[in-house]
Image: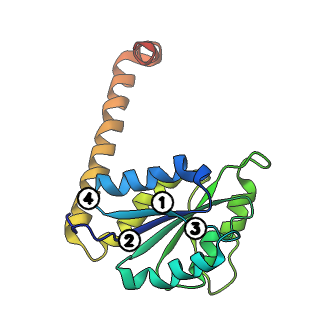
Amino acid sequence: MKDGDAPLAGIIMGSDSDLAVMAEAGRMLAEFGVASETTIVSAHRTPARLVDYARGAAARGIKVIVAGAGGSAHLPGMVASMTTLPVIGVPIRTRTLDGLDSLLSIVQMPPGIPVATVAVDGARNAGLLAARILATSRPELAAALASYAARMEAEVLAKARRLEEGGPETYLEGMRKP
């Protein structure tokens, strides 16, 4: 799929400390040729930027937003309250509660403000979900996603054959070799 330089997905996070996790969403989208933009939008420290980003995303051609946040994790819900675009929340692992605080904050949206939520630090799946949302109107992207799923299936089946033919000890020995 080639959509030129215009990003179809927005990837936002509350802090640069979230970038190592959130970069996975961009990598997943890039694997399918989906252009994305990535930036920092803090719900608490830059509220005006949050409003501008959320309200202007659709006009800029963005079709889906992946929003990562830790702790109180207000970013995904606040963005969802200001746009009709699909928003995917990525709870970021925290030191205090190991990301449970982030997960619960994002998943507990009030009625009328939906946010799809992936696992703690699950930005890769968030990128994949964003690609699936975009694929509903892009047959070539749907085909690429089907090929991706077929590759994953083939990898698992090959591992199952190796395990069944060689047994657990041989399989584990093969995993230990560099």
Q: Secondary structure at mark 2?
A: helix
In terms of sequence position, does the residue under pointer 3 or pointer 2 come before the other?
A: 3
Question: Would residue 145 be found to the left or right of residue 1 on screen?
Answer: right
Determine whether label 1 and label 3 are within 8 Å by CB. Answer: no
Distance from label 1 to label 3 (Cα)? 18 Å
Q: Are marks 4 and 1 in contact (CB under 8 Å)?
A: no
Q: Type of residue at label 2?
A: Ile
Gap between marks 1 and 2 measured at Cα: 10 Å
Q: Secondary structure at mark 1?
A: helix
N-term-proximal mark, 3 vs 4: 4
Circle nearer the N terminus (1, 3): 3
Residue 31 placement, left or right of 52: left
Marks 4, 1: nearer the viewer: 4
**Residue drawn at x 52%, y 64% as measured from the top left:** 12
Instruction: Examine the rendering and report whether any part of residue 162 can be seen.
Output: yes
Q: Earlier in the sequence, mark 4 or mark 1?
A: 4
- Residue that numbered label 3 is attached to: 41
Q: Report how many numbered discs are placed on residues in the image.
A: 4
Marks 3 and 2 sit apart, C-alpha to C-alpha, by 23 Å
Q: CA distance from mark 2 to mark 4?
A: 14 Å
SS for tag 3?
Answer: loop
Sequence-wise, which precedes: disc 2 or disc 4? Answer: 4
User: What is the spatial separation of the Cα atoms under label 4 and label 1, in whole angstroms?
Assistant: 16 Å
**Residue on which disc 2 sits:** 133
Give the label, 3 or 4, closer to the camera. 3
- In this view, the residue farthest toward the right is 96
Residue positioned 30% across, 70% down in the render: 135
Identify which amino acid the numbered label 4 is placed on: Gly
Disc 3 to disc 2: CB gap under 8 Å? no
